[in-house]
């Protein structure tokens, strides 16, 4: 096992800024999969996360103004990944909690939340690895 | 080889040609494998070998004609097989060069067909890794009682976590799904992807009409409204309605026609 395969340190933050365009969502998904793999998420968790990221983007992207950037913040702690995607907006926005995207997002994640101020709209969600739920020592 | 090569040389005596090819082959191979010769001379000899054995490639490629790929392309990929054979051929083995080269050339052409057949081109390395990941995931899921982590997969397969992620990524592009593909349950008459796709509901338009007709109905005079109600909601005949309201059936008919016309007009205006 080489050094790149070691687990992440206790706390690590990653930010990614991409154009607010759906074409870049796949970049976020790939990034998410990469980070989650480091955190010892299972393959199924990773698949869920990829979908969750896509849905979170589907919620915020239509609200983006002009050629603003989509910012994704990843907070990494052992066994937990918190992802926040946000876009600049022309005013406060609210997430449609009945929408398909929100239903999927809240089902696949441990918690999901939408926040908005006058200039940004952010959807944040947290996912825990099913490894940490299963308890320590389950890993190989 | 000699037969293959001579088949292309037409009227020239096949025996004569075969002898010439064999001689030339030995000569060029000697030059190519001569470690003391300058690089340029060796490469020239290699080029000469490729030229010499091109008829063999053409012969092999012709076997795959009429399979949807241009012959020129097949000759081209077959030539790659030829070059590989020339580079790897062991003179000491004592086998004819054509015996050694033919499977390599045909293998190259077959691989070309296989690669072209994919929906989305994925490198072979990833394709193999993907299959390994799939089978190992199944195994580990059994052993662990849950889906494995990329780290566990990497340890089991003997590659890096990075490669596992790449492999998982590529599997999403490996096969595209036909819209007509049947459901995985495999029963005949299964639900196809296309069946599950959303369509605009045929009744959707009706909703709009119903919603816009509501206020119009409300605005009707009580008698007209009552007639509509009896006719279309209670399913009464015009004669029954006439008796109930106390007018002639003719009159009911006229009122109905007029009311419906009015409704239709107002609907069209509102659209």
Image: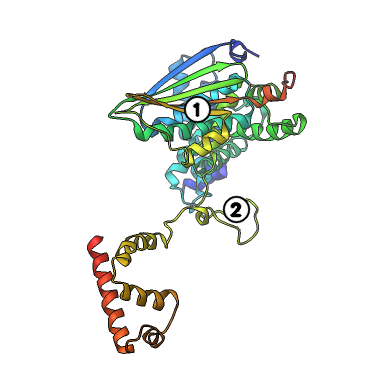
Pick the quarter of the image with the C terminus of chain B.
bottom left
Q: How many marks?
A: 2
Most distant residue in the left direction: B269
- The chain holding disc 1 is A
Q: Which residue is denoted by mark 1 in the rendering?
A: A30
Pointer 1 and pointer 2: residues touching (CB < 8 Å)? Answer: no
Given residues A90 and B181, the one toward you in this image is A90
Task: Examine the rendered structure and indicate whether residue B39 appears above or below residue B4.
Answer: above
Given residues A107 and B220, the one toward you in this image is B220
Tell me, for residue A12, which label it has, or none. Answer: none
Instruction: Give SS at disc 1.
Output: helix
Residue A82: percent from left, percent from top? 53, 22
Can you see residue B54? Answer: no
Tell me, for residue B183, which label it has, or none. Answer: 2
> Measuring 69% from the left and 35% from the top, which residue is drawn there?
B135
Given residues B241 and A100, the one toward you in this image is B241
Most distant residue in the right direction: B143
């Amino acid at each position: 096992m080489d050094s790149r395969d070691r687990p992440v340190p206790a706390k690590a933050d990653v930010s990614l800024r991409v154009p607010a365009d759906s074409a870049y969502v796949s970049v976020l998904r790939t990034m998410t999969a990469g980070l989650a793999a480091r955190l010892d998420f299972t393959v199924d968790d990773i698949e869920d996360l990829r979908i969750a990221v896509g849905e979170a983007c589907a919620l915020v992207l239509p609200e983006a103004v002009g050629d603003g950037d989509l910012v994704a913040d990843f907070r990494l702690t052992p066994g937990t990944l918190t992802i926040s995607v946000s876009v600049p907006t022309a005013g406060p926005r609210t997430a449609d909690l009945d929408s398909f995207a929100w239903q999927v997002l809240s089902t696949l994640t441990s918690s999901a939340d939408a926040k908005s101020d006058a200039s940004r709209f952010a959807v944040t969600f947290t996912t825990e690895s099913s490894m940490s739920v299963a308890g320590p020592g389950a890993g190989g | 080889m000699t037969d293959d090569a001579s088949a292309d040389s037409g009227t020239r005596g096949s025996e004569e040609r075969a002898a010439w090819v064999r001689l030339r082959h030995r000569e060029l191979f000697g030059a190519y494998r001569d470690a003391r010769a300058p690089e340029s001379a060796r490469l020239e000899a290699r080029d000469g070998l490729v030229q010499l054995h091109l008829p063999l490639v053409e012969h092999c490629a012709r076997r795959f004609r009429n399979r949807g790929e241009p012959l020129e392309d097949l000759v081209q990929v077959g030539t790659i097989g030829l070059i590989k054979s020339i580079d790897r051929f062991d003179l000491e083995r004592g086998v004819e060069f054509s015996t050694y080269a033919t499977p390599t050339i045909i293998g190259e052409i077959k691989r070309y067909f296989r690669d072209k057949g994919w929906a989305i081109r994925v490198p072979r390395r990833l394709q193999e890794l993907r299959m390994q990941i799939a089978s190992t995931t199944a195994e580990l899921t059994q052993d662990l009682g849950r889906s494995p982590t990329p780290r566990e997969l990497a340890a089991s397969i003997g590659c890096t976590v990075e490669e596992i992620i790449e492999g998982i990524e590529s599997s999403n592009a490996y096969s595209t799904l036909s819209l007509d593909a049947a459901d995985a349950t495999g029963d005949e008459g299964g639900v196809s992807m296309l069946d599950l796709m959303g369509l605009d509901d045929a009744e959707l338009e009706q909703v709009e009409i119903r919603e816009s007709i509501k206020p119009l109905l409300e605005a009707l005079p009580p008698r007209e409204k009552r007639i509509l109600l009896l006719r279309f909601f209670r399913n009464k005949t015009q004669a029954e309605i006439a008796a109930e309201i106390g007018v002639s059936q003719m009159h009911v008919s006229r009122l109905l026609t007029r009311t419906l016309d009015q409704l239709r007009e107002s609907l069209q205006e509102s659209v």
